[in-house]
Image (cartoon, rainbow, N blue to C red):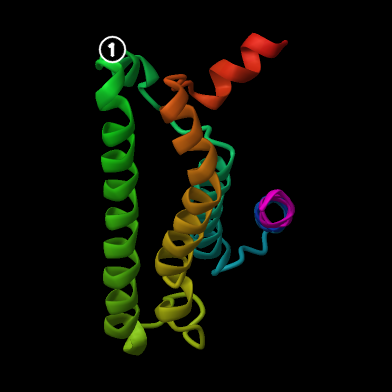
């Protein structure tokens, strides 16, 4: 499981890196072209799509690293016998939310099949919005890969946010 988690983390890191470099290059190109008097009609729209993609894929990576905002103190405040059920409920709600997001995102893609980008009319909005169901599935995979450690910590009564645990080891 550790190897799978590492491979998944590397995949998400590379996706985020490629998106960041592409976004930076695209914006730089747009600024340079605008400076020399040749404005690119498509660069604003593509930059916003790339930023959305970066946000969604980055959120999946953050979920894998357990770097999202958490409230471990709330779980710690609950009597020990209720911690594991509370963590299981919280994880179930996260999975349910992202399953719903993936399902609704898929429906949105069908609705947008006939819509196209304004500045690049050959590109369907369906493709640009595919990030919603894809990232929802990636988020669920990240949560599933973290689930054994989350449950182990809950059983031990040691609910800590990953960022806090990293600070403690430094």
Above or below residue 3? Residue 46 is below
Magenta-highlighted stretch: main secondary structure?
helix
Q: In the image, what residue occupies the spot 46% across and 23% down?
A: 156
Looking at the image, which residue is at 39% across and 26% down?
A: 70
Mark 1: few, some, or many residues within 10 Å (few <14, many ≥20)? few
Where, by quadrant of the figure, is residue 95 drawn? bottom left
| Residue 115 appears in the rendering | yes
Q: In the picture provided, is 91 more to the left or to the right than 61?
A: left
Position above or below: 109 against 67? below
Quarter of the rendering occupied by the C terminus: top right
Q: Can I make out residue 36 in this image?
A: no
Residue 131 sits inside the magenta stretch: no
Position in image of residue 107 (x %, y %): 27, 78
Residue 150 to residue 50: above or below: above
Residue 79 falls left or right of residue 14: left
Q: Nearer the viewer, residue 157 or 165?
A: 157
Residue 65 coordinates in the image, percent (x, y): 59, 38
Q: Which residues are magenta?
A: 1-10
Residue 73 location (% of width, % of height): 35, 14
Q: Position of residue 68 (x, y in %)?
A: 46, 33
Residue that mark 1 sits on? 77
């Amino acid at each position: 499981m550790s190897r799978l988690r590492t491979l998944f983390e590397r995949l998400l890191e590379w996706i985020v890196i490629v998106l960041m470099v592409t976004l930076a290059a695209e914006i730089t190109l747009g600024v340079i072209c605008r400076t020399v008097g040749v404005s690119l009609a498509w660069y604003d729209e593509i930059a916003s799509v790339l930023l959305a993609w970066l946000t969604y894929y980055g959120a999946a990576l953050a979920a894998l690293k357990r770097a999202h905002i958490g409230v471990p103190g709330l779980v710690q405040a609950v009597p020990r016998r209720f911690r594991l059920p509370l963590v299981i409920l919280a994880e179930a709600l996260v999975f349910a939310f992202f399953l719903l997001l993936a399902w609704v995102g898929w429906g949105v893609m069908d609705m947008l099949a006939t819509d196209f980008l304004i500045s690049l009319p050959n590109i369907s909005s369906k493709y640009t919005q595919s990030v919603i169901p894809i990232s929802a599935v990636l988020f669920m995979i990240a949560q599933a890969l973290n689930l054994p450690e989350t449950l182990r910590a809950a059983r031990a009564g040691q609910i800590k946010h990953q960022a806090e645990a990293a600070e403690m080891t430094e």
